Image: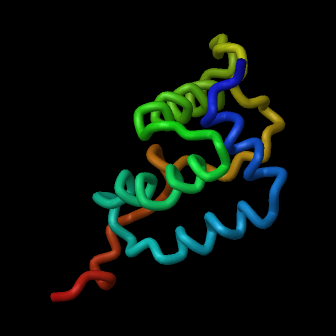
Amino acid sequence: MKENVSLFFERCAADPALKARIAEAVACYPGSLEVRESLVEAVLLPIAEEEGLPFTVSELRAYETRLKLSHIKPDVQIEEGEPDEDADFEGYWLLDRGWENDTSAFKK
């Protein structure tokens, strides 16, 4: 049986309204690496819960680690239920999302 994280991202890839809802919430992101885990807790986890696919930050981290490993070392066997290479991949939430500290977003 696939884990909820994988199922949630499959649903996101197939549901434009869900994808847009998440993108709208992420647009409010202030640009600090320190809050990415808090952003996951405030945005992604509640939406996943509403979709009936709850998961934790640590489950997301494990999922992303396996996914990243599968992209870096394609010869490494990943567990059943992990995403296909052809999955609609849009990046990571906790690992290498490309977010940077945007100091202009903070009050001085």
Identify which residue is drawn at 42% across, 60% down: 42
The residue drawn where x is 38% and y is 75% is 30
Relative to 104, is 26 on the left or the right?
right
Residue at the far bottom: name it.
108
Q: At which x and y percent is residue 44?
A: 53, 54
Looking at the rendered image, the quarter that the N terminus falls into is top right
Structure colour scheme:
rainbow
* Quadrant in the picture for residue 77: top right
Left or right of residue 86: residue 6: left
**Image vertical order of residue 10 relative to residue 2, above or below:** below
Residue 49 or residue 17, whichever sits in front: 49
Where's residue 47, x and y in %?
58, 55
Can you give x and y, in whole percent of width and height, for residue 9 in the image?
69, 44
- Residue 108 point in image, percent of width and height: 15, 88
In the visual, does 87 lie left or right of 57? Answer: right
User: Residue 41 versus residue 62: which sits nearer the camera?
Assistant: 41
Residue furthest to the left in view is 108
| Residue 108 position (above or below residue 34) | below
- Single out the residue that lies furthest toward the top: 77
Q: How many labels does the image show?
A: 0
Question: In this rendering, is residue 1 above or below 49?
Answer: above
Q: Which residue is more in the foreground, 108 or 57?
A: 57
What residue sits 66% from the left and 68% below the top? 21
- Residue drawn at x 67%, y 34% as measured from the top left: 6
